Amino acid sequence: MERILSLFISGLSRNGRAKHRLPVIMVMLVLLLVAFLGVPLIAHAADPTGADTLKENPTAAVNMAWTLITGFLVWFMQLGFAFLGAGLIRSKNQVNYWTKSFMDFCIASLGFWAFGFALMFGGSKLFPGLDSGNSLIGFSGFFLTGASYDVSTIMMWFFQMVFAATACTIVAGAVAERMKITAYLAYAFIIGAIIYPVYGKWIWGGGWLSTLSILGTTGARDFAGSGVVHMVGGLAALIGAAMVGPRIGKFNKDGTPNLLKGHNLPYVVIGTFILFFGWFGFNPGSTLAATDLRISVIAVNTFLAGVTGALVAIYWTFARTGKMDIVMGCNGCLAGLVGITAPAAFVPPWAAVVIGAIAVPFMINTAHIVERVLKVDDAVGAVPVHFGGGLWGLLAVGIFADGTYLGVKGLIMGDVGQFLLQLVDIGALIAWVAPTSLLLFWIIKKTIGLRASREEELQGLDVPEHGMEAYPSELPVPAGKLAPVPAGGKMPDLDG
Amino acid sequence: MERILSLFISGLSRNGRAKHRLPVIMVMLVLLLVAFLGVPLIAHAADPTGADTLKENPTAAVNMAWTLITGFLVWFMQLGFAFLGAGLIRSKNQVNYWTKSFMDFCIASLGFWAFGFALMFGGSKLFPGLDSGNSLIGFSGFFLTGASYDVSTIMMWFFQMVFAATACTIVAGAVAERMKITAYLAYAFIIGAIIYPVYGKWIWGGGWLSTLSILGTTGARDFAGSGVVHMVGGLAALIGAAMVGPRIGKFNKDGTPNLLKGHNLPYVVIGTFILFFGWFGFNPGSTLAATDLRISVIAVNTFLAGVTGALVAIYWTFARTGKMDIVMGCNGCLAGLVGITAPAAFVPPWAAVVIGAIAVPFMINTAHIVERVLKVDDAVGAVPVHFGGGLWGLLAVGIFADGTYLGVKGLIMGDVGQFLLQLVDIGALIAWVAPTSLLLFWIIKKTIGLRASREEELQGLDVPEHGMEAYPSELPVPAGKLAPVPAGGKMPDLDG
Amino acid sequence: MERILSLFISGLSRNGRAKHRLPVIMVMLVLLLVAFLGVPLIAHAADPTGADTLKENPTAAVNMAWTLITGFLVWFMQLGFAFLGAGLIRSKNQVNYWTKSFMDFCIASLGFWAFGFALMFGGSKLFPGLDSGNSLIGFSGFFLTGASYDVSTIMMWFFQMVFAATACTIVAGAVAERMKITAYLAYAFIIGAIIYPVYGKWIWGGGWLSTLSILGTTGARDFAGSGVVHMVGGLAALIGAAMVGPRIGKFNKDGTPNLLKGHNLPYVVIGTFILFFGWFGFNPGSTLAATDLRISVIAVNTFLAGVTGALVAIYWTFARTGKMDIVMGCNGCLAGLVGITAPAAFVPPWAAVVIGAIAVPFMINTAHIVERVLKVDDAVGAVPVHFGGGLWGLLAVGIFADGTYLGVKGLIMGDVGQFLLQLVDIGALIAWVAPTSLLLFWIIKKTIGLRASREEELQGLDVPEHGMEAYPSELPVPAGKLAPVPAGGKMPDLDG
């Protein structure tokens, strides 16, 4: 065993000697920690193959397949966010942005695995093994431990984790091109471990927002997370962007903003395509069941709101400027999708069209406020789409719900209670996320530091933080010549 | 309420004043129209949660999950079409092309929602709420209204809509680099609202082609749309490209064509990959049911035809030129996929290989005719793949169907009736789509105008029509220097 | 008929005369071969619509939908491999690399269709029609023929084919930038037709490795193919890269390696995203059944191993160099995913975290050995990830299996037999794949030739092998000027 370890150590050190022991120690620590937590678990999970579950409920198979596949689609949205943001920022920060986009869900999901899931669903009793918790916070399921969790609990973890990861990644774009990667990854862990799940507990984990009664109506409603995912991510993005400060050159001395153009417009459209695709998992999958045939209505509502948002936004810019601004079209589409996320199951298709259309002025107004009033530099427009659109989504439940699904009724059905519940929900969300995000970014600022140096920012973060460029040999190599890209500054040996 | 409206209006106008009221009015009109249509619908849809449907038919869950997920894959083909076309055209038209690719499905799907679905499936009685119509055209389901539609009807709408959107987007590539975006989007609405659905009604909506009998065989067959989607789209593409005229520089004075190279060959392959992926939804999903276990045969047939098409095409170019032309490989793959689309369910795997192989000469001959005989400039080869391949697909049903599925038999089983029905189908398709497309593009030409100006075309459509470039900061920014990309022509304020 | 043929022939020859008959003859031969094999099959397949299967087993629908959809995801990994490798190599070889990436699965899958599936599953009796074979090799199912195969066999073919195609494509990256495309495609056919399936037979097709008993434990275990797919592909990659030799400039005279930088770092991340997405099909789909609710555990284990691998790898580079090396992060992620592939169903989530972490030193050590000890030029790091990670995966089954699934127990449960079986499996894999791959590449070298000429390599393979560049008009075209890209070297006619 010792020999094996020393073999690893020598391998981990490229030159054959254990020069830097830190990473090795880190690996060992992770292994020890997890092994320590894991050992008591061996063979303890209830019904580990799901045979009992299936016998009791034969539809478990189709429902689990549905939930997992839609969860895969939600996870794939990570790539959409990466493309979208990467397209809107400059070449010199591409490696940095793609690294953040990839690593943030890795870290956030481990935070959600270690702590978040337990805080959010402990005590919900939604699935086996989630027994302990109160209406503010849960206490069971840390590290997916517990003698009584089963395959359904594991499925639930997967589906919830991809949502937590989505909330996390919304922030990447807003703080792009100047936040240090170490700072960003520290944020990612905490939002997945604490900020997202605590609010999530209140509404999705059986917490107080889901049991609150107003005027005889019980429970705020956020079907697939206009609030839980998008407003939370959008608000954290606003606070992160405010704390890290605007990019050099974003605002003039008189406070007027400049447009710092991105580097790849097609990437913006590609990102939106992939996000739209993922949304077909996000909303319809949130039934956690294919036996809930409402999924077809949810899919259609999601689609209609997205396309209406895109059309209203692009024709709005066309009417104003005579140009078809596809960035605005994409943002309108996304705002429509965010807006329909909370009400998707509760409203009829015609209302989805209306909701998608109205999401656009919410998005535009939020952008105006962020950039012109608050003077915050949101590099990719994450706050308008996710906070603005999400706010509208929570309101829209209270307006357009038609009573055909779970009895949820909005103003159009003459019910005021739901609308008031939604307002309380919005208030609670802001009251939790704003101060905790502020505190989080403040602590990071005082410890790791939030912002790259002025020199690094001007140069672009790729080389200083990652030691590489995004497009190292993008310029064409003349035919018959070898691209001069040796390691260590030495020309390659052409006879090698 | 008035305050809220005025708030929106002021927000919609960036500078705080309601300078351009048109977009606001447009938004309001959309809302009013939809709300007007929507109000009678509140709580009217039958079985809105699908509980009754499920009780009656427990397999509805797996079938709906299957249909929706495969529908998502079909929708994702939009991204494949976008990549494919974008790779084959020049940098200067990228924003324009991506905008068309994104906005066309938005518009076409709204057209299909408002009118198309009703025209196509009204009277088919395939699903609840589709009662009224005759063998030429349907009359029920406009705006997805009707007291008796249910979750299955909604599911059907979704699946059919993604097919309509596919037919629409085929045209984008053929007319790329010179058709005005406003003209293109007007076309997109009409093909989704009228041209596609009327022919679709005839064969998929219970119309006359599906009930016609010849020599004792009843009904032309087009399993997943070699005709309905691909020939319709390909034919509209041919007529659109002919009407808008060739790109500057495409044809020499003596009528010989030039190759106007695209800007990104990898994009062509990426697009083909994504289209292939989506085809796994397109064909197998067209059973609308996972309980129809023929789906495995359909998936395998689809796959085999695609790979055979790719191989035959690329080795054909290799044999002729000594070069492996991947563009030809991709087009061969797509032609094979288009070709297998109609017969996918009716033929054995060996026939799929043959069909995929023969699709290639159909594609190549069509290209020859379009470019050399008709002298039409199809910028991305959409007509050969979709019209040529689709024509072959409809014929192939009448040749290779082996009688194991729905009793459909082709020439190899000694049945001539089916082959003749397929010929009638092809004739009917052309007889409807050609004149209506011609009329449509003629009307657009006389009103909006089809073509960008010569100056805009030479410059590229991105800046004139969209006010932006695709790769604004693609050229590397020297380290330590700020990219000079201010808004409004002023240098950014480095101390900001 | 003759007229039709002559029409095709004249069309196939662009200038209207049958100048090169070779391609036409090739097409005809393919058709004849397949038709000859196909004719006896007409209407022979058992239960062609699956109606009997479904009556016997109503869960066949959800299981087939699950298997097909996850198979689609596995197939989509082809695009991930293409992006990943393309990003890591230079611009001048992009067309070549994308062509290989696309055409290799086309050819490998036809090889698997013609021969591989029969060799691998003949005699397994897993599905109807797979009757004849012994414990070393199978004999039934060539060209998917046989009177008794049914829809389940066809489904099995599809799922297995996408795995064979994955093993094949792993090699593309290792030999990139210098192997001739004709040589590479010849390899692709043979690995799909022979090398992959024979070993696959031993462990997945009911062969001797699956029935071997040691210390009372029966059967080596490789749940989703750490060995079958990844080690096989990785080992073939190692041998291919060794046989073709290093790229010009890779090694200096003193044997020290240079880094030949890729051209697009974002592509590396995009590729990893898509591969990760596909892995959700790869592992969970390998149950071939959604009624096996273990799928949720498999999905979560897969995910946790991937993110842990990414984190350990990137923080390891960060600790050593102060830079976050995203290429290392991506490779760590992939190594974790490869490592969890064999044990995914047999271990609890905490073990997945440990397995993902330990995959990283396996990957790094393998890289060290390949580049520094063996001095083999693996252009994209395929061997470390797939061979190194795969080796670890097979071992990990023997260590961490907790006995909750199929009774498989590893060292942590005090069982030594499984661990020894895994060692035998590893030995058998190497003993089969290494000599056959060596022989294969040797034969190709002596016939077609493995390597492009020095001139072609320096110029890049795109123009010599494909006659085109990847980014022909990438450099911006000055506004108002036409891009000078005529065919045949003549300027386009601007008045055309």
Image (cartoon, coloured by chain):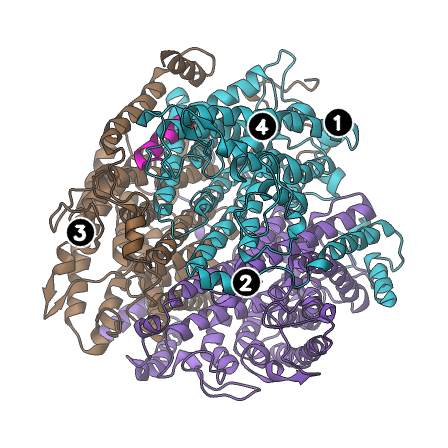
Chain colours: A purple, B cyan, C brown
A188 left or right of A382?
Answer: left
**Range of magenta residues:** B347-359
**Nearer to the camera, A137 or B177:** A137
Image position of A308 with respect to C19: above or below: below
Residue C325's spot in the image, x, y percent? Answer: 47, 61
Q: Identify the residue position indicated by label 1 in the image.
A: B454
Q: Magenta residues: mostly which secondary structure?
A: helix
Above or below, comparing residue A73 to residue A60 in the picture: above
Where residue A368 sits, quadrant-wise, is bottom right
Q: Amino acid at mark 1?
A: Arg
Residue neighbourhood size for the residue with mark 3, other residues' Cα within 10 Å, grouped as few (<14), some (14–19), many (≥20):
many
Local SS, label 1 = helix
Q: Amino acid at mark 4?
A: Leu
Circle 4 Cα neighbour tier, 10 Å, few/some/many (<14 / 14–19 / ≥20): many
Near mark 2 (Cα within 10 A), the count class, few <14, some 14-19 or many ≥20, is: many
Q: Nearer the viewer, residue A471 or B134?
A: B134
Q: Dividing the picture into quarters, in which one does residue B189 lie?
A: top right
Pointer 3 indicates a residue of which chain? C
Q: What kind of residue is marked 2? A: Arg
**Residue A177 in sight:** no
Left/right of residue C356 with respect to residue A462 in the rendered view: left
Q: Mark 3 belongs to which amino acid? A: Ser
Disc on the earlier residue, 1 or 4: 4
In the rendered image, residue B361, in percent from the top left (x then y), is placed at 43, 23
Q: Which residue is mark 3?
A: C124
Viewer can see residue A443: yes
Query: Residue C475 at x, y = what percent?
Result: 62, 37
